Amino acid sequence: MSIPPITVGKSKGQFNQLNANDLTFVLGHETQHAFNQVSMASSYRKFDAAVTTIAKDNNPVNDYTSPVENLINSAREDEAKAQIAGWNALIDRERQTNPAVDLNTMRNLGNARLDDFIEASPTNAKQTQARPGITFNQDGSLPMTPQNISAQATYYFDKPPQGAPGLSTRQTTGIGFHGDSDYPNYYGAGAVSRAIAFDRAYAHPVGGIPPQMQLDMQRLRFREDLLEHNGITLPPGTTATPQVYWDTSTNPPTRGLLQHTQGTHQHISPIPDIDPRLPGLMPPGKKEQPDNELLEKIRSGVRSLDQQAGKVWDESSERLSASLLLMAAEKGFTAKDDLKFAFNTPTEKLAGGEIMHIWREGHHSPDPAAHRAHMTTQEALSVPADQRLAQVEVMQQTKAQEIMQTQQQETMQTQSTQARSM
């Protein structure tokens, strides 16, 4: 907590008149945060364990919505308790000079922070009442009951961000680097950054499908611009690699991108394209993204074919590489496979080079068809590389959803069987 010099540099009279009440409330609020650190530390440990389990499991879809939501809810309770402590600190200060202090006295202080606790009576504007859901003790202090905590969380933590249509400044929250954030996005930036770190450390391909990070942005009340304004922190050594995620609040999920903004606090829009050939776009502990490794392996094979034909790398090389990637992804090939590439040799029916083949050697699958794929060269060259790569992304997303649905069905069947056996 920082106190501006202009506040502490005032005379005693000016300070008591203009700043003492607000500073008393803030000190009570921040002190309660210190008392809450034990429970918050436990919440972070639970969060770390939950996201690690998701990242390491055998589902390529890594939906971190629930653990992020649980961590935000812990912060929500932390802030609500801190607000209650702030009220109690201020009314206790007032009681020292006015033992008969009541809700009317508190409202007459004119401190906007108290709007989260009390309001004018709708039948008599001169009288003050507690806001719905809040119950004071007889002396005006506020106990930390579950009901009071819940109500204060609603009035304080849940306020929409500054600039929300139809709401006054007092009805919104303006915090964070730019003063434009609400609390869910303020705490969300840290929670999402933490999830990204675990995802990059432990997520892995499943069945040839690269890991896909998911967040239900609407359920979490997140906005990508506010998260980045508050500062997204990507792991050291990977800050140049934006984090792709899928927003599951839309159907189908919408692709999003989170940049490293801890230093800039700026939202970059529209989303820039990521060139998988660029160096440095790598998560920790891995040389490259799984898809990029496979694409680079394919490009290396195409480059060899170009050299054999005496041609240089060009747009057709890119198109051929992207088409081979689509075939490889459909078969579940990975960069770890021993992949081979070749055009067909001339036959009575086909001229040489009309068919592009890709196959893998040394794989344990007994099905020969699982190791080979082919496409006419004409078809492989007919689609621009970026469009073909988009097809790969859609295909992988579909396969990932199918795997997730299959696992969900198996879980439901297991639970149903267990229920019948009880």
Image: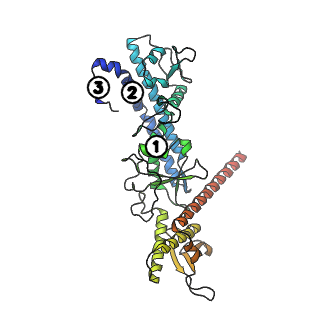
Q: Is residue 86 above or below residue 44?
A: above
**Element class at badge 3:** helix
Instruction: State if disc 3 and disc 1 touch (CB < 8 Å).
Output: no
Marks 3 and 2, the one that precedes in the sequence: 3
Q: Position of residue 121 (x, y in %)?
A: 55, 17
Q: Is residue 65 above or below residue 325?
A: above
Q: Residue 13's x, y, as percent?
A: 30, 17
Residue drawn at point x = 59 percent, y = 62 percent: 395
The quarter holding residue 27 reads top left
Q: Residues within 10 Å of mark 3 (few under 14, many from 20)?
A: few
- Quote the CA–CA distance across marks 3 and 2: 14 Å
Q: Position of residue 159 (x, y in %)?
A: 50, 33
Nearer to us of marks 1 and 3 is: 1
Q: Nearer the viewer, mark 3 or mark 2?
A: 3
Q: Mark number for residue 26? A: 2
SS assignment at label 2:
helix
Quadrant the C terminus occupies: top right
Alpha-carbon distance for marks 1 and 2?
Answer: 25 Å
Secondary structure beneath disc 1? Answer: helix
126 or 1: nearer the viewer: 126
Q: Which mark is residue 226?
A: 1
Q: How is the image coloured?
A: rainbow
Toward the viewer: 242 or 70?
A: 242
- Pointer 3 residue: 8
Most distant residue in the front direction:
166
Q: Work out whether mark 1 precedes mark 3 in sequence or the reverse, and give the earlier one.
A: 3
Residue 39 appears in the figure: yes
Disc 1 residue type (three-letter): Leu
Kind of residue at badge 3: Val
